[in-house]
Image (spheres, helix red, strand yellow):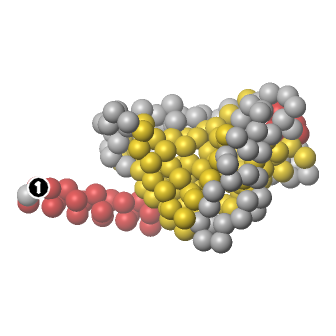
Amino acid sequence: MKTKMICAVLATLTMSLWCAETTDTTVFSDDFKDKAVFEKNWDFRSPTQPQEGVLFLAKNHYAPVLKTSIAGKDRITVETEIAVMDKKGFGGLNIDGILFFLRDGNAVAVFKSPLKSYHDSRLKKVPGYEDGKFYKIEITRTRTGDDYEYLYKVDGQEICTVKGQKIPVNNTIRTAKSQTDVKLKNFRLIESKAQ
């Protein structure tokens, strides 16, 4: 019991120091205004192309995958603004196989943990949600020992933290959508390093 308490205190202190003394660096950003930047940095299929600062993803089109790997990065934050056009479907991001998305007024995280025999999820209502309106989604992945922790926010509101699940990482970031058209803008990948 005493050992667990000491470990918990040390983990909290370590996290506090990490948060207090970090440098953030933008690894990649795409405002979807330059087609050449999009084509160089995303794995996509035609006819998907950005137009006037918005990446429109039709419901029957391939969802692009960022070519930049997040392997070896202890703490990253991925943020974008997303608009889901129809409440019957969902739109968001897939990081390491975990879906972080918006659907029918809810922010949802869905994942398959090797510790469980089923898919698990976390869900929280988004106040004043409207189909077609842009919302800023932000996912922060932080290494915690031999595992990762994922903090999910929508418009600055904490939705959930997925942790302690031993989810195998694939170090990829994908756009994610199903049964609806989706719009994205202002994508950023940020790495935080302790000083």
Residue carrying label 1: 3
The part of the image, by quadrant, that contains residue 126 is bottom right
Looking at numbered disc 1 in the image, what kind of residue is underneath it? Thr
Identity of the residue drawn at 67% across and 61% down: 136
Out of 126 and 39, give the one closest to the viewer.
126
Identity of the residue drawn at 60% across and 50% down: 101
Out of 125 and 29, give the one closest to the viewer.
125
Judge from the rendering whether residue 21 lies leftward or rightward of residue 46; answer left or right: left
> Up-down: is 93 above or below 102?
above
* Observer able to see residue 172: yes
Residue 108 point in image, percent of width and height: 53, 53
> Up-down: is 85 above or below 146?
below
Residue 41 point in image, percent of width and height: 75, 35
> Up-down: is 33 above or below 9?
above
Out of 117 and 13, give the one closest to the viewer.
117
Secondary structure beneath label 1: helix
Q: Residue furthest left?
A: 1
